[in-house]
């Protein structure tokens, strides 16, 4: 038979009449339907499970591994959290620590974390689609699931959904949250924690109501053009203003400025001392006053040295007027009642020395290109319009311009923002994390008409900010409240009385935290009264020195009088007492030399305290904790005792290890430490 | 082999059990064949004999048959789908995910249901136009045409109510757009929409209503009207196969 | 039997023979009455098997589609996030497209109601049943009416900028005029067109219109119901 004939006869046999066609087609349909279970059989996850069994087959602990392995679809189901996570279907070895050498996914064991793997499931932290059982759909953004896996570098954002406090293990999240406050992000954008607390700025943008007394219009214009040209560490972002815009804004700022209540007239301004000897003296006064605890300055090598609480002073001489500076150094509060700068109580000579030193810190290049003709009223008016448009009053107090409400979009839920609501700049991958990163890095790439200014941020700062913003999710709002670890509520604590006035005058809160309020540059003082001896406190206030050899920053000397030191010490000793224990629980006079000796043995032997602390400056090399050479004079016996028993309850988050000392040991070590009263100080180690 | 299979089948047909099920016996005569149709509760909607010409593809394109076919596929896939579905918010959507990722052949069931639904709408429309262009609506078939229009509307309602059930963005907004049209009805617009949705917006009540309509009310109505439709084909003189060309 | 007889009534006991039908033939209102009926076949197995084969072919196609392409599923319904554009199911996109031009009460209520009513009443109008060619009688008068109706409708559509309806309407009107031409030797296409009744023209117009509007709504409408190309990826 020829081939066409065969084909024809086969066709005839299969489809010759409707009955055989029906039979043939039924067969074909059945075969096609058989693809359905076949497709099920060749599912990705089944393949991975087979692969896993092959992987563990040759290993030493194969028996126990395979006993723990559960085949089939796995899921972690927690209806109250909305968790349906099937990740463990393919990620079979998350709990198998013995597979630590396996580097291929999906079989890598999970690194150790503080939570149980089954406590919250996977997706609450890693995002992605937990219900999915294919690689593509579980990890990537699809039509039916927007949120892809969170890249590892933003992972700390997930911790931030519940942990509104500071966690030791989340440095990037903490850095990001700090940066949100520090760079003034929260002054334009409202950001609320899931517990409803609105984040506040921790920067101190200066008020501009009296700006004309402080600096020149030329400086303002040059600063506005590029703040980082004046000070590399400036927090103020670059608003990318045109020359005529800086001209008009500076015109307006000068025009709106009113004179402030100065010391002028009551005292002559000290003359600036410019000769070399005076300059030398001024330099050392700047150092002795620990100005660099807060202010940074570029040294000759171009390195920035100093703190970031106050503005960088590298080119301060090009900025401020001497009369203003004199006034400011005498008492900063007259110019800015809310400044963080303490009242130093300097005398006229010291003021003069510092003025001389700071005036020498000028940079003629900075203002070289700025020449401004006298401002016209039209320019002033235009300047005001610009100031309103750019939202300057979000940060700065300006006469005649009110702080705008809801100036920028609220970011409380930015971590769950639907991608549909986002317009991506060209070249930005379509994920939320990339969008946030790109937006922080280069806001104007999303449109020239946008108001957000250009910040100067290091890549890790951008990542940290993105991490903090990614923590602002819808999930964080909807998780059960019981899971939430609340952050510190903002405190408006104000000490009262004469001591309160002193604390305010010296701006202790700029560095110290008391009762939830204040900075964290210096130790917290909330329970200071329980911890220290009064005599030590008085002498410390009059002449502070650092307690920790490893720290550079030190408390400035405020030239307090005996009466002031006594007032402060009385207040601290009475008010800042912990309720955790009673001072009378331990009578230090009952300690025997045997106690001291036993304590010494424990100190050097069982607990090896010398790893971090120094008692004998000639022998011990511990530079991490405070020096204990005079600890007996500084700390009370009860404090030491309770500190040894449970330091975390006295100062949560302290680096002091948890010792779980029994009462006898703690008592003996306390006896040893209380005996350390008059050992010679090791000055050299501190310098 | 084929022969023996045929013999086996023939033997099977002679058993008492078989004969108790199929009242008419099996046989080679037209009487047997007629009884096979006439004695069957479903098939008797059709006449025992049909015009040979009406069977040719050119006449109907089998559009009515195919519409029924999609309906049957939809019932067949719809019932298993109901087993995995909760008409509640947001579980409905979670069920879609389960169908996709956890249920054996769940994806296939949903796909087949969805595509068949689209096919049904297309086929019913095509059927309508084909019938119109062939003039098959003319008396005595005018009422069957009306039933056909009713069936078209039922098809649209079935598809539309089913559209909401996955409770995804596509569903929600398609139904929102559609139901906003209802409120354009003069005077009673918003009231009718309230009745349809069980609220002023598409919400959990709307989902439940649409579910009941989609799974109970409309399929039942469609089945009844399909039965009438077929019955009327028979009663109105069979499938209209056009004029005989005179030789 | 070329002439229909007035009345035939007969009885026969042989059920195997085709029974004689009784038919009352009135003028023009019924389908062609056949004195000779067609050959018939048994429904079982001939008809049923054919139907089954047809349904199986359909099932094969649908199963294949279901195996190859997944049904769409988007994110969880979120009343606060409106997709742009928000589209109805495809079979309502013609209406949604009209909604772009006309107020909701017209596009959403009036037009669908008229379409449904129009469909229902088709078989109850004598003119549809006779199905006479549009131009067989009163040609001049009908041409005049057609011209007026087309002009009025065209102006109305132009005012509302409904070009998606206007252009097909004009094309169909043009082919109607074309079919009405009186030429000595008309082409076969023209003859075919000329034999078509009014209902054919209206239905065809409706079909073309529905198809075009649905296609535009489905493939050519993007954010804010703006006109986009299907390959622009904005739909």
Image (tube, coloured by chain):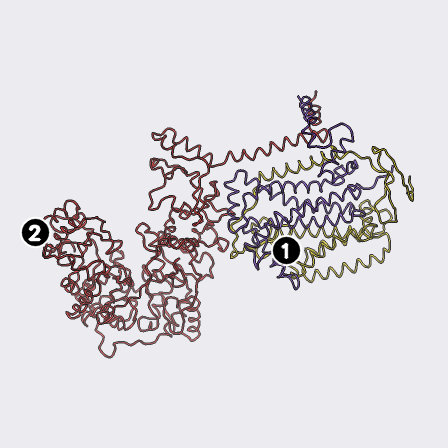
Chain colours: A red, B purple, C yellow
User: Do callouts 2 and 1 mark residues in contact (Cβ within 8 Å)?
Assistant: no
Quadrant placement of the C terminus of chain A:
bottom left
Above or below, comparing residue A14 to residue B181 in the picture: above
Characterize the local packing of mark 2: few (<14), some (14-19) or many (20 or more) Cα atoms within 10 angstroms: few
Q: Residue at x 71, y 42 (%)?
A: B64
Residue beneath label 1, please? C96
Residue C35 placement (x, y as % from top left)? 87, 40
The disc placed on residue B30 is: none
Instruction: Between residue C52 and residue A542, name the one nearer to us.
Output: C52
Q: Position of residue A591 (x, y in %)?
A: 10, 54
**Neighbours of disc 1 within 10 Å: few (<14), some (14-19), many (20+):** many
- Residue occupying the far bottom of the picture: A265
Secondary structure of residue under mark 2: helix
Q: Indicate whether A58 appears above or below A238.
A: above
Indicate the secondary structure of the residue bearing disc 1.
helix
Q: Quadrant of residue B46?
A: top right
Quadrant, the N terminus of chain A: top right
Give the distance between the C-alpha atoms of the residues marked 2 and 1, in whole angstroms: 96 Å
Compared with residue A521, is residue B167 higher up or lower down, i.e. above or below? above
On screen, residue A546 versus residue A209, left or right, reads left
Q: Please tell me which residue lies in front, B195 or B71.
A: B195
Read off the chain for label 1: C
Both labels 2 and 1 in a single chain: no
Residue pictured at 22% horizontal, 53% vertical: A647
Relative horizontal placement of residue A478, taking residue A347 as reference (left or right): right
Q: Which residue is mark 2?
A: A593
Q: Position of residue A149 (x, y in %)?
A: 43, 46
Q: Position of residue C15 (x, y in %)?
A: 83, 34
């Amino acid at each position: 038979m020829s081939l066409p004939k065969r084909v024809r006869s086969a066709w005839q046999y299969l489809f010759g009449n409707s009955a055989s066609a029906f039979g043939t087609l039924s067969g074909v349909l059945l075969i096609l339907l058989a693809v359905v279970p076949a497709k099920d059989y060749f599912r990705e996850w089944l393949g991975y499970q087979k692969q896993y069994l092959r992987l563990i087959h040759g290993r030493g602990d194969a028996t126990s591994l395979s006993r723990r392995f559960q085949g089939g679809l796995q899921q972690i189901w927690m209806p109250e959290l909305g968790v349906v996570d099937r990740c463990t279907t393919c990620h079979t070895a998350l709990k198998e620590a013995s597979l630590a050498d396996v580097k291929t996914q999906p079989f890598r064991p999970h690194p150790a974390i503080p939570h149980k793997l089954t406590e919250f499931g996977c997706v609450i932290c890693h995002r992605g689609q937990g219900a999915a059982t294919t690689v593509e759909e579980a990890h990537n953004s699809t039509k039916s699931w927007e949120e892809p896996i969170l890249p590892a570098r933003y992972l700390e954002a997930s911790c931030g959904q519940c942990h509104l406090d500071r966690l030791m293990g989340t440095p990037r999240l903490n850095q990001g949250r700090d940066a949100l406050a520090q760079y003034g992000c929260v002054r334009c954008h409202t950001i609320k924690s899931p517990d409803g607390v609105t984040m506040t700025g921790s920067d101190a943008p200066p008020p501009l109501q009296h700006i004309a007394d402080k600096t020149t219009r030329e400086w303002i214009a040059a600063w506005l053009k590029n703040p980082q040209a004046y000070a590399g560490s400036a927090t103020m972002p670059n608003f990318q203003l045109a020359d005529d815009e800086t001209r008009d804004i500076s015109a307006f700022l000068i025009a709106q400025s009113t004179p402030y209540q100065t010391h002028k007239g009551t005292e002559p301004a000290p003359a600036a001392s410019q000769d070399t000897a005076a300059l030398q003296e001024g330099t050392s006064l700047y150092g002795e006053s620990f100005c660099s605890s807060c202010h940074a300055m570029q040294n000759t090598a171009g390195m920035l040295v100093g703190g970031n609480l106050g503005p960088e002073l590298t080119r301060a001489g090009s900025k401020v007027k001497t009369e203003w500076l004199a006034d400011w150094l005498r008492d900063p509060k007259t110019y800015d009642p809310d400044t963080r700068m303490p009242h130093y109580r300097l005398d006229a000579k010291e003021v003069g020395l510092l003025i001389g030193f700071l005036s020498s810190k000028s940079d003629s290049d900075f203002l070289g290109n700025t020449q401004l003709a006298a401002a016209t009223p039209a320019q002033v008016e235009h300047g005001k319009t610009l100031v309103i448009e750019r939202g300057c009053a979000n940060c700065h107090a300006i006469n005649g311009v009110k702080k705008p409400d809801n100036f920028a979009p609220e970011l409380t839920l930015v971590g769950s923002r639907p991608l549909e609501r986002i317009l991506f700049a060209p070249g930005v991958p379509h994920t939320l994390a990339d969008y946030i990163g790109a937006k922080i890095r280069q806001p104007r790439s999303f449109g020239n008409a946008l108001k957000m200014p250009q910040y100067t941020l290091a890549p890790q700062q951008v990542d940290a900010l993105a991490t903090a913003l990614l923590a602002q999710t819808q999930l964080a709002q909807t998780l059960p409240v019981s899971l939430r670890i609340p952050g510190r509520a903002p405190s408006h604590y104000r000490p009262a009385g004469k001591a309160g006035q002193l604390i305010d005058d010296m701006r202790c809160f700029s560095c110290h935290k008391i009762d939830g309020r204040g900075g964290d540059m210096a130790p917290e003082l909330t329970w200071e009264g329980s911890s220290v001896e009064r005599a030590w406190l008085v002498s410390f206030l009059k002449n502070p020195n650092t307690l920790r050899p490893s720290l550079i920053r030190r408390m400035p000397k405020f030239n307090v009088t005996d009466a002031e030191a006594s007032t402060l010490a009385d207040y601290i000793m009475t008010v800042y007492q912990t309720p955790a224990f009673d001072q009378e629980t331990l009578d230090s006079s009952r300690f025997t030399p045997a106690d001291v000796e036993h304590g010494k043995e424990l100190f050097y032997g069982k607990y090896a305290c010398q790893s971090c602390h120094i008692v004998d400056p000639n022998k011990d090399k511990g530079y991490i904790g405070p020096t204990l050479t005079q600890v007996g004079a500084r700390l009370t016996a009860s404090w030491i005792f309770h500190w040894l028993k449970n330091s975390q309850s006295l100062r949560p988050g302290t680096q002091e290890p948890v010792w779980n000392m029994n009462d006898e040991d703690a008592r003996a070590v306390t006896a040893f430490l209380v005996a350390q009263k008059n050992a010679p100080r090791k000055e050299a180690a501190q310098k | 082999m084929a022969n023996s299979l045929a013999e086996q089948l023939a033997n099977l047909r002679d058993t008492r059990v078989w004969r108790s099920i199929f009242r008419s016996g099996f046989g080679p005569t037209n009487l047997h064949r007629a009884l096979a149709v006439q004695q069957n509760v479903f098939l008797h909607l059709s006449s025992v004999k049909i015009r040979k010409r009406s069977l040719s593809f050119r006449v109907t394109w089998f559009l009515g048959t195919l519409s029924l076919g999609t309906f049957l596929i939809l019932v067949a896939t719809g019932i298993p789908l109901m087993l995995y579905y909760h008409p509640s918010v947001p579980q409905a959507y979670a069920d879609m995910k389960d169908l996709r990722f956890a249920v054996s052949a769940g994806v296939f069931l949903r796909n087949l249901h969805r595509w068949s639904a689209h096919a049904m709408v297309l086929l019913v429309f095509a059927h309508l136009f084909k019938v119109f262009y062939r003039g098959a609506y003319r008396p005595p078939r005018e009422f069957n045409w009306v039933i056909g229009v009713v069936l078209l509307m039922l098809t649209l309602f079935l598809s539309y109510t089913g559209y909401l059930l996955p409770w995804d963005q596509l569903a929600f907004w398609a139904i929102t757009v559609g139901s906003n049209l209802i409120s354009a009805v003069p005077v009673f617009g918003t009231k009718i929409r309230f009745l349809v949705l069980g609220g002023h917006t598409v919400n959990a009540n709307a989902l439940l209503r649409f579910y009941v309509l989609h799974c109970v009310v409309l399929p039942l109505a469609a089945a009844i009207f399909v039965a009438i439709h077929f019955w009327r084909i028979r009663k109105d003189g069979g499938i209209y196969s056009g004029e005989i060309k005179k030789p | 039997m070329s002439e229909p007889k007035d009345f035939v009534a007969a009885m026969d006991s042989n059920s195997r023979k085709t029974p004689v039908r009784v038919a009352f033939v009135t003028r023009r209102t019924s389908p062609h009455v056949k004195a000779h009926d067609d050959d018939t076949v048994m429904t079982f197995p001939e008809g049923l098997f054919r139907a089954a084969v047809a349904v199986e072919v359909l099932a094969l196609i649908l199963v294949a589609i279901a195996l190859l392409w997944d049904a769409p599923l988007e994110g969880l319904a979120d009343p606060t996030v409106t997709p742009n554009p928000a589209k109805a199911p495809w079979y309502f996109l013609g209406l949604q497209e009209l909604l772009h031009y006309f107020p909701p009460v017209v596009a959403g209520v009036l037009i669908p109601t008229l379409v449904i009513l129009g469909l229902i009443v088709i078989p109850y109008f004598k003119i549809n049943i006779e199905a006479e060619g549009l131009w067989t009688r009163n040609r001049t008068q009908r041409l005049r009416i057609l011209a007026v109706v087309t002009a009025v409708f065209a102006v109305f559509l132009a005012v509302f900028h409904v070009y998606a309806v206007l252009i097909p309407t004009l094309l169909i009107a043009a082919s109607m005029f074309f079919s009405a031409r009186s030429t000595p030797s008309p082409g076969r296409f023209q003859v075919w067109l000329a034999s078509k009744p009014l209902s054919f023209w209206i239905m065809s117009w409706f079909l073309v219109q529905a198809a075009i509007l649905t296609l535009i709504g489905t493939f050519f409408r993007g954010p804010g119901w703006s006109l986009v190309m299907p390959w622009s990826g904005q739909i």
